Amino acid sequence: MVSPDRLAAILEHFRVRTRLFNTGPLCGVTTFPAHPGRGFLHVLRRGEMDIVHCDAGGMPQRLRVDQPSVILYPQSLEHTFHNGPSPDDSDFACATLDIDGGPTHPLLDALPSAIVIPLDDADELEPTLDLLFAEIDNVRCGNRAIADRLFEVVLIRFFRWLLDHPDDIALTTGLICGLADERLARALTAIHESAAEPWTLNAMAERAGMSRSAFAAHFKQTVGQTPASYLTDWRITLAQTHLLAGASITRTATDVGYSTTPAFTRAFSTRMGCPPRAWLKNADANDLEEPLPSTST
């Protein structure tokens, strides 16, 4: 049996947008503020530093980075770089990260708050990073647009690396772990490709080539939630993309697999804390604010 493309359906439905905003050294203390639905992708090309952010309980956490590395903050989380005072102490390429679906996107939600991977441990990123650095280092027409798109490729290759190395970042549950499992990947990919199908537990288990009970138990243990709960989360995440693109609530409900608009509205409200119309209003307000990194010596 041919293995499914575990990322294609996710990336087809959710547009990745990366935007280069810093190249070169960062001196002293640089704070990257949180912004709803926004992450950061940093590449430390040269130097070493300490990174500080708060964990889910609000306690400060400090990470030491002492070699060239890719640093991913997949979720909205304020973090601070502590670099030496001289421009010769570091060299960076930094981009903001936006993925349709924002903080509820299951690919991002399954990841730790911060991931640091030394470049020596991720050889498959090297060709794309070489192209990225070539654009950054040689200012020519269109290089900013090219750099933005190359950062998107870096991110996708980074996701692909994570699928093959979940143990390297100590992942025990979540979508990455599910997609790394050959049997669950078949069911998850089918759900991602056809969310509006009338999925039952039996149908999902059949895609995985497992019995109903074995599939349910293995899915819960690996992904961290029941198949039905994951399906609902995926549908609601898809719905956000449709709504932001201007689709009506009624059309969105049908497109993501709900037989009635009230059923969709109840599911959306349960997951998001407010009905679709109120959520859209809040999303539009958040788009008006875009805090920028601040540096102090």
Image (tube, rainbow, N blue to C red):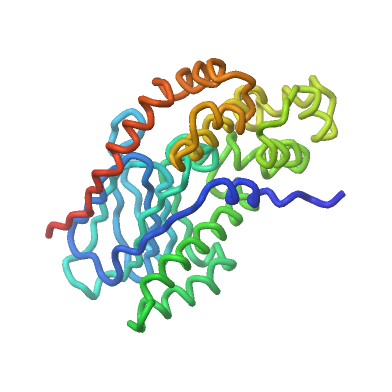
The residue at the point 59 percent across, 67 percent down is: 124
Residue 157: quadrant of the picture: bottom right
User: Percent position (x, y) of residue 170?
Assistant: 55, 42
Q: Is residue 102 above or below residue 15?
A: above
User: Percent position (x, y) of residue 108?
Assistant: 49, 42
Quadrant containing the C terminus is: bottom left
Q: Is residue 22 above or below residue 221?
A: below
Answer whether residue 63 is visible to the viewer in this image.
yes
User: Percent position (x, y) of residue 230?
Assistant: 61, 28
| Front-lying residue, 12 or 261 | 261
Q: Is residue 224 above or below residue 38?
A: above
The residue at the point 43 percent across, 46 percent down is: 74
The extreme right residue here reads 1
In the displayed structure image, the side of residue 201 where residue 274 appears, left or right:
left
The residue at the point 67 percent across, 25 percent down is: 227
| Front-lying residue, 124 or 241 | 241
User: Percent position (x, y) of residue 275?
Assistant: 42, 21
The extreme left residue here reads 297
Residue 68: quadrant of the picture: bottom left
Q: Is residue 96 above or below residue 191?
A: below
In the displayed structure image, the side of residue 247 where residue 289 appears, left or right:
left
Label tally: 0
Answer whether residue 230 is visible to the viewer in this image.
no
In the displayed structure image, the side of residue 201 where residue 144 appears, left or right:
left
The residue at the point 37 percent across, 52 percent down is: 40
Residue 135: quadrant of the picture: bottom left
